[in-house]
Image (cartoon, coloured by chain):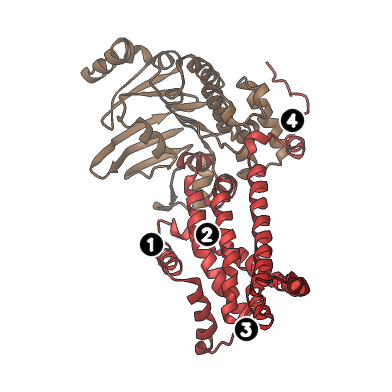
Amino acid sequence: MIEVEDLAKHFGAVRALDGVSLSVAAGEVVCLIGPSGSGKSTLLRCINFLEEPTSGVVRVGGRRVGWHDHDGHARRASARELARTRAEIGMVFQHFYLWPHMVALENVIEGLVTVKGLSVGAAAAKGRALLEKVGLADKMEVYPEHLSGGQRQRVAIARALAMEPRVMLFDEPTSSLDPELVGEVLRVMEQVARDGMTMLVATHEMGFARKAADRVMFLDHGKIVETGTPDEIFGRPRHERLRRFLDTVLV
Amino acid sequence: MHLDFGVAWKFLPILLTASLMTIALFVLSQVLGTVAAFFLALARMSPRGWLRRPAIAYIWVVRGTPLLLHLFFVYYAAPAFGLTLDAFPAAIIAMSASAAAYNAEIIRAGLQAVHRGQLEAAYAVGMRYDQVVRRIVLPQAVRIVIPPYMGNAISHCKNSSLASVITVPELMLTAQMIYSSTYRAIEILTVTGVIYLVLTSCLSALQMYLERATAYERRGLGGARRRRLRLDAPLPSMPA
């Protein structure tokens, strides 16, 4: 469902991504772990072209992101084509980025109305069901600033789910939450995973990776150092760098 | 000193009629200047140099030279380009051009105050640039921009008095004509000042109204929005 080939992203002299290749099968949950600055966020941001890769190819659902393949020739995708591709890729951000001038329900249905052209009424019915599913039935008409971090992130997940994306990218979704709010967000993510969503999750929550991931990838200095099942990564790490990383996070 | 406000009273209808011209000058140039300013601000923020550089140059020149000069320039320079303008359209052009330069920077400040992450979240659900601007950036920017924008509008309203120098029969020119024939400068200027004060007070009141109307998080949802969102309908319970 997600295919990444030899992806590189340079910021000046810094190689944030240095030749990353991976693939995520439909329905698979893959967790990206690694130290801060290892390239996890950049990788996710390149997959939906919020960041333009320096080189390499990204495909989601067989379609190339940011480029239009035509008879073996590739040209840059138009703004319209890129928007259409992004609508199929859900993204959840570390800092939520809910739109503060809209209540929770309006945040969830904004894409349905503006991008998919649904009527507000039809979109609202769907949005209400989604907010109920993430446990926020009583917060539909609350503005983001009156929600806790955990509630905001659950609204953000509902907002991404509303578009019925083919894949979901999570960029450290619990890293800016108070510890006691992490659980409610992880439970929603586990529910999304059980529903069969293809997920690529950058996270520092090793408990979540161990429990929910089909595969775990360890990134360091812009490269995938090791890939394996949670048992392999956490139980029998092969690389010294991964062992040292796990020692620092699993205290 | 002997004051005779009877003179001012007698000429009040003429002053009020002239203030309609002041209002026309202000409203028309403010609206044109704001529309132009919006596109100027977008150009000013563009990553494309051929859009950004002319916008920077325009703002630099127009903001850096007096409106009085622009008025003379448009009025007296137009015939050299084979175009004879009446005083009123010349004033509208000069005042709109000036308002555009100032408002562009105010609008830019508002647009840039919206966090980049908000835009990324909008792009991530599949919105295009124009949708992001319309649905995400503008509603938030409008609110941020109200105090500086209205402050500038008040200045602009008063600056319409400069159009008197190119013979637009607005409030200031009319006042000058009245007191130069009646020699009642104090009375006429006092009444004229009160009329300007009423006009600018309306703008201050409008500002307060707009600030209240856009304080969304304190106001909550209105009835129309609640109905559109069908918030009062029973919850469709999820199948287990």
Q: Could you tell me the amino acid type at mark 1? A: Gly
Mark 4 and mark 1: span between their CA atoms?
47 Å
Q: Closer to us: mark 2 or mark 4?
A: 2
Observer-nearest of A95 and B106? B106
The answer to whether the residue labelled 1 contacts the one labelled 2, judged by CB atoms less than 8 Å apart, is: no
Chain A's shade in the image? brown
Q: Are marks 2 and 4 on the same chain?
A: yes
The answer to which of B61 and B113 lies nearer the viewer is: B61
Q: Please tell me the numbered disc located at residue B86.
A: 3
Q: Disc 2 to disc 4, how far (Cα)?
A: 39 Å
- Chain at numbered mark 2: B
* 3 and 1 marks on the same chain: yes
Residue A126 placement: quadrant:
top right
Chain B, hue in figure: red
- Residue kind at label 2, given as amino acid type: Asn
Disc 4 and disc 1 on one polypeptide chain: yes
Q: CA distance from mark 3 to mark 4?
A: 56 Å
- Label 4: few (<14), some (14–19) or many (≥20) C-alpha neighbours in 10 Å: some
Q: Say whether disc 2 or disc 3 marks the residue closer to the N-terminus.
A: 3
Subunit under mark 4: B
Relative horizontal placement of residue B15, taking residue A56 as reference (left or right): right
Name the residue type under label 4: Leu
In the picture of the structure, the residue carrying the numbered disc 2 is B103
Instruction: Give the mark toward the camera: 3 or 4.
Output: 3
Eyeballing the image, is B104 above or below A2?
A: below
Estimate the x, y position of residue A122 in percent, counting from the top left.
72, 36
Which of the 4 image quadrants contains residue A118?
A: top right
Task: Determine whether label 3 and label 4 are within 8 Å by CB.
Answer: no
The answer to whether tags 1 and 2 share a subunit is: yes
Horizontal side, residue B78 vs residue B10: left or right: left
The residue that disc 1 covers is B49
